[in-house]
Amino acid sequence: MERCDVAIIGGGPVGAVLGALLRRGSQSPLSVVLLERHLPSPVPASEDVRVFALSRASERILRSAGAWESLRSTHYAVTPYERMHVWPASGAAREEGSLTFDAAELAEPNLGCMVSNSALQWAAFEALKESGGDVRQVEVTELDFLPDSVRLRGQSPEGDCQLQAKVVIGADGAGSMARRAASLSLEAQDYQQIAVVANLRCERPHEATAWQRFSGAGTLALLPLTDDEGGAHKVSLVWSLPRDRAEHMLSLSAADFVAELTAASGAVLGQLTLMSERRSFPLRRSMTEDYVRERIALVGDAAHIIHPLAGQGANLGLMDAATLAEVILHAKREGEDPGAERVLRRYQRQRQGENVAMALSMEAFNRLLAFGGDPLGQLAERGMGWVGQSPWLRKIFAREALGLGEKVPQAARLKPSDRSWLRR
């Protein structure tokens, strides 16, 4: 039977970036096999309606994995944004009570980048393959946990296949087969909300700004994108609404939909026009009690899902990948078994607390601001105004969103010219 050091189940950006970091992080690389049922193919950024807001830490992780340059070369796939402007239902954009984070206050070139899902996934796959990782079209159906390894069984276009790995990584999303096979329990909460997403053309330029309004009945975000002419008249919509309201909005004609959307945004970017189909996905929070057991670890959506209110899901997943890669590579250098539970627990200790804190924070924002109106919600709105008036507080929140703290893996602290972690 074929053997490898690490088998990654799931071919999303988090799993592929983890594989590339494992390959690039050692002078004697681990053997890495990624198993994915549907291999990705390039999709023009203009046709992708799902967009991620990547932090500075995520950008550095992608650079460390060798994916950033490939991503930057994708036509209009990456749009830096310099500001984030937030305002409550009770006020208007740019008026008292609103809040603006500006990269200039931090002496940073931008606050992050908007990246299409398909472009990010393709760049991560290319980085993994360029690093020497093995990518296979396989649907994994069974895991057998042995004392010193895991046997994986699955189906490929050529038929049955088997593989034996020292460590298995579950990067296979919300419905994770790896999580179920490892009997890792999941606690979930359905928000009874739906996110409506689409690409739009805006009458006024977006000013390299992410616009977000807490409407009192959900959250409306207009995220800046680069249009086909290289201009600033395209945005990505993420509109979180109660289920009934979302279904009503999806049933409207395009003209009626954009009329309601323009009104809900306070016409902050003028008249809006649909450039794509409307899509939707249900919103929920989920957390596994444990990210690891002997021979297996979960990353990204397989381990945790949070409300998309602040666009932090992808950033948390990439931080998982960088942290787990660092833990496994350190164990290899020290002569430890990288699949031992005591080793994998180090990853869980570093990531679980931060992920839970972010999930609870987003839940509080959703409850108090997106659906505010009661006394606590009114107090939260005033608090947002206080933050907006304090440069010191704005800087604290902005630096946290950028991922510029000290408690991050080495790959997330790198400057573009720094590759010292590869030699450690």
Image: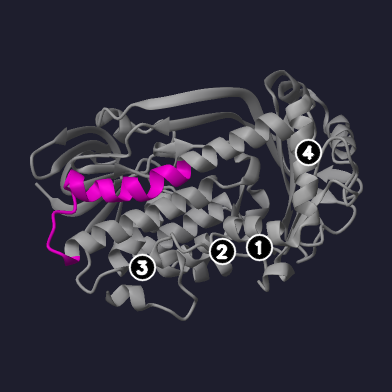
Coordinates of residue 422 in the picture (x, y in percent): 31, 74
Is 229 in the magenta?
A: no
Residue 111 is tagged as: 1
N-terminal of the pair, mark 2 or mark 4, is 2
Residue type of the residue flagged with mark 3: Glu
Q: CA distance from mark 3 to mark 4?
A: 48 Å
Most foreground residue, 60 or 66? 60
Coordinates of residue 338 in the picture (x, y in percent): 18, 54
* Residue at the spot 81% in from the left edge and 39% down from the top edge: 88
Q: CA distance from mark 2 to mark 4?
A: 28 Å
N-terminal of the pair, mark 1 or mark 3, is 1
Assess whether mark 3 and mark 1 are in contact (beta carbons under 8 angstroms).
no
Q: How is the image coloured?
A: one colour
Residue type of the residue flagged with mark 4: Glu
Coordinates of residue 204 in the picture (x, y in percent): 89, 56
For mark 2, give the secondary structure.
Answer: helix
Q: Which numbered mark, 4 or 1, is in the foreground of this view? A: 4
Q: Is residue 331 left or right of residue 229?
A: left
Assess whether mark 2 and mark 1 are in contact (beta carbons under 8 angstroms).
yes
Residue indicated by mark 4: 381
- Say which quarter of the image contains residue 54: bottom right
| Magenta-drawn segment | 333-355
Q: Which numbered mark, 3 or 4, is in the foreground of this view? A: 4
